[in-house]
Amino acid sequence: MGPGELCWAPEKGSLPLGARAGSVQPACVNLRTMGAWALWMLLLLCKISLAVLPAKPENISCIFYYKKNFTCTWSPEKEANDTWYIVKRTYCYGRKSDHCTTGNSTSTNRTSCSFYPPTITIPDIYTIQVEAQNADGIIKSDTTKWILATIVKTEPPEIYSVKPVLGVKRMVQIKWKRPVLAPASTTLKYMLRFRTVNSAHWMEINFKEYFFGHATYNLMGLQAFTEYVVALQCVAEKSMFWSGWSQEKMGTTEEEAPHGLDLWRVLRPAMVDGRRPVQLLWKKAREAPVLEKTLGYNIWYFPENNTNLTETRNTTNQQLDLYLGGKTYWVSVISYNSLGESPVATLRIPAIDEKPFQCIEAMQACLTQDQLVVEWQSSAPEVDTWMVEWCPDLDSEPSDFSWESVSWARNWTIQQDELKPFWCYNISVYPMLGDRVGEPYSIQAYVKEGVPSAGPVTKAENIGVKTVTITWKEIPKSQRNGFISNYTIFYQAEDGEEFSKTVNSSILQYGLESLTRTTSYTVQVMASTSAGGTNSTRINFKTLSISVLEIFLITSLVGGGLLILIIPMVAYGLKKPNKLKHLCWPDVPNPAESSIATWHGNDFKAKINVKEFDESVNTDEERILKPCSAPSDLIDKLVVNIENFLEEVSTEEPGKGQENILGGEKNEYVTSPYRPYCPSGKNFKEPSISTEIPSGKSQYLCSGMPEGNCSEAKEQLLSSASSLGPDHLCEERAPNPYLKNSVTTREFLVSEKLPDQTEREV
């Protein structure tokens, strides 16, 4: 037994009949060969289990393009790249067969296959079967049968003329050529479609041809003088496939007299003289031809029930301003051209005092995808005609009015592209019953809203300590771009947090409260629509430090307090006027009427009488003290002398001094004629002044004195006069009232009549 072999021997009891035990050899099997066979079988089973066959072709469809090809298509349209198709065909009623292959490329036409002439004949019946193949196998489709006469598709016809027929109104004649690639023995059916130039809606007509060659069709029931667009397609009588549409061709119907007018009016307020402006408006009727030509318009109007006052106008415009009276008028308008006149359009103008009827209860406008729809509710079922009027809502008087009549409906629709976006429109609906026009119902609408073009003009008013009023103006209508839904006020203190307040669109001012005293604020107002908002220009203001009320309260308190003080004072003054006079104007003591002290008894026996000393200088003007610049030690000397004098008097003669001071006669303060006034810094040369005392005056001075003392007094006076000298003399100036009672310039006090002097005179 070799390596890799497995051997075994049968047992004794299992020997075959007639076999001897020694004659039977053991059986041996090669293990390597068995392993190889097992591996091969395993791979074969995996390959079979992983094989993917192509999808079965279904939905086979075939078309016979006359004299071009026979093409079949099927599904699935998307298949693996390693799949290819074979289309098998039988033709000549099953006597012949052939096939076409699509290949296994990645081209987009792998699910269609075509057969070309000359193997294509008509009439005939084909059978078609499609096989799908890939590396894993083949799948065949069901066999389909096709009758060529039912799947033939021809070329479209060629239109070469669309013209009106002379003398036939509202008709065009269409001429075309029969398709060349169409069965000659087959009758063709046609489909004609047409529309006006400005319309997108097609209308279609089906008909058969009556003879071969050039075909003609008269299209009737059209609008006069209107341009139409026409196209044709055809199909074989038994076929299910229509040809494509021919190239479009245009033609125009013949012109005729104007069709008619739609007439409307705009009533203005009556003038002072009683006349009422009326604006007449008219346009072509809705069913009038687009290309209708008009040379002019005739207008005539007259008061109701009085045709004798008819007035006539002619114009080439589509509006006319009339000034009618306060009564009811009838207005008629016709248009004309070279072919005739239009039917008459008539309108009744109500009297000024006529009250129109009301029947519209509610109205609303809503937007659809591309239309604006207006709906209303009426309480008068007999009203079945309405006039819809719309115009832009501008800041100025509207002049561009549009209108349209609506019958047997309570809604009106307009395309959005016929209205301008971001413009507000006033839409009014007038009920019409016969020749009477009722009270209109109006609303406003936008076909498209946007953010405002500008913010409101804002300003701050009534600025207080903690409050301010923010006012703003409405945005002009041309800049709103939508309905203003609300206003938002943004305000912020300097280096502070921003706050906002929102109010509805009817409010044009707002009061801010709880502000900080003496603080700068920034404010702006935002106007918002459904599309967004626009802010105004920022404005600044500063709150006050004190309010007018506080000023009023303080003034009232101070004024009240003063009034409380004044009233008792006035009452006290009325009751005791002298005391009030002394309180308000106190008496200033006159130094001339007081006794300073008594003179020394040993030196002087009586006071010097200054009046007797010099009567010539005792006038009112000379009694005023005249200041003069003096040496700086002069005042000190006078003060020291007076103090010494008073001390001596108080020690030597207290009784006499007290008697003279308290009970003496009237004293008077006088001025010295030898003391002129001299401004500071000025010296003037004066005539030499004698220092001698006149004899008369010396007698007064020395009266009542011993001779020794008198001589000493004279020497003192002479020495004091000489000490001043000419250097201290200056030009005498006007008397200074301030120095009249000055104590520092006082020279001395004398009694008019001293007691000793009185005894001497006796």
Image: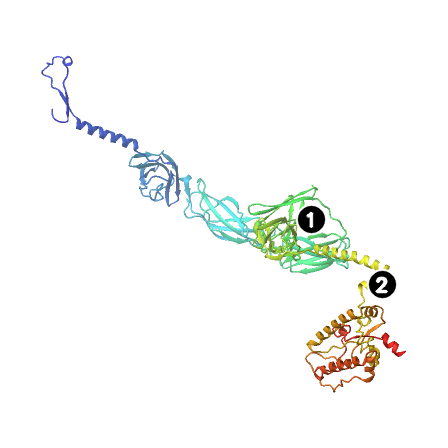
- Label 2 crowding class (10 Å Cα cut-off): few <14, some 14-19, many 20+? few
Q: Position of residue 154 (x, y in %)?
A: 42, 45
Quarter in which the C terminus is drawn: bottom right
Quadrant of the image containing the N terminus: top left
Mark 2, secondary structure of its residue? helix
Q: Find disc 1 in the rendering and name its residue.
A: 440
Q: Is residue 128 above or below residue 639?
A: above
Question: Image height check: is 407 above or below 477?
Answer: above
* x and y percentages locating residue 235 in the rendered image: 45, 43
Q: Residue at x 51, y 53 (%)?
A: 250
Marks 1 and 2 sit apart, C-alpha to C-alpha, by 89 Å
- Residue 56: percent from the left, percent from the top? 35, 34
Depth order, front residue of 215/650? 650
Q: Is residue 420 visible?
A: no
The image quarter containing residue 57 is: top left
In primary-sequence order, the first of circles 1 and 2 is 1
Q: Residue at x 17, y 26 (%)?
A: 31
